[in-house]
Image: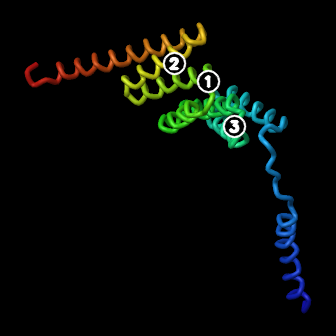
Amino acid sequence: MRYIPLIIPIILFLFLAKPLIVFSTAPEPANKPVNDSTVIRQAEGLIRQAEKQEVTSPRKALVSAQKAAELLAGSDNMNHLLSQAFIQTANAYLMLGIIDSSVIWFNKVLSLPDVDATAKGKALGLLAIDYKKLGNYDKAHQYANEGLKVYRAINDSAGIFKMLINDARIYNSRSEERRVGKECRSRWSPYH
């Protein structure tokens, strides 16, 4: 009975000191160069995972894409993978309905130096969708036309088709909004 006051501090020390010892002796993570093939493979896997999950589970896709972007952060020569990670992050935000964040991530793609034309066209087309959802049809039309120019420059028929469809949807949304507004004005007008 008289040893209990001595045993309690020893037990507490063992339980509390063990994690401290483990954390203090853990090696510092080495700053590996981004060109390391394992980092590149891991980032590619995360991007593919985000692509698969973007419709079924956008939150998981967002996490995967952001991990890929973090892995590739600070790289100058990996713009192709970095643009894919940014596009998947923006897509996940778009699927979650967080349009402002989606716009930010698509603009990050466009700000990358030497980004490939396919990624630039995809980012411009999806920016057009973002602005259409925000109700800014003029800016949406502008981005759709820029994306169309990019896809025409590289002669990508699938991209051209997507941009033309985007532009038609933007025009249709604007027309529908005007029609509904006109109908409401005529129906609820005091002179009706």
Q: Residue at x 88, y 74 (%)?
A: 14
Looking at the rendered image, the quarter that the N terminus falls into is bottom right
Kindly identify the residue that appears in the image at 48 percent across and 24 percent down.
129
Q: What element carries label 3?
A: loop
Q: What residue type is labelled 1?
A: Ala
Mark 3 vs mark 2, foreground winner is 3
| Residue 17: x %, y % from top left | 85, 73
Residue beneath label 3, please? 76
Residue that mark 1 sits on: 119
The percent position of residue 11, horizontal first and vertical second, equals 87, 77
Q: What residue type is labelled 3?
A: Asp
Of the two numbered discs 3 and 1 in the rendering, the one whose residue sits closer to the viewer: 3
Taking 155 as reference, is 132 left or right?
Answer: left
Of callouts 1 and 2, the N-terminal one? 1
Closer to the chain start, of discs 3 and 2, is 3
Q: Mark 2 points at which residue?
A: 147
Asked where in the image residue 41 lies, by quadrant, the reply is top right
Label 1 to label 2, Cα distance in Å?
10 Å
- Toward the bottom, the furthest residue is 2
Q: How far apart are marks 3 and 2 (CA)?
A: 24 Å
- Amino acid at dot 2: Gly
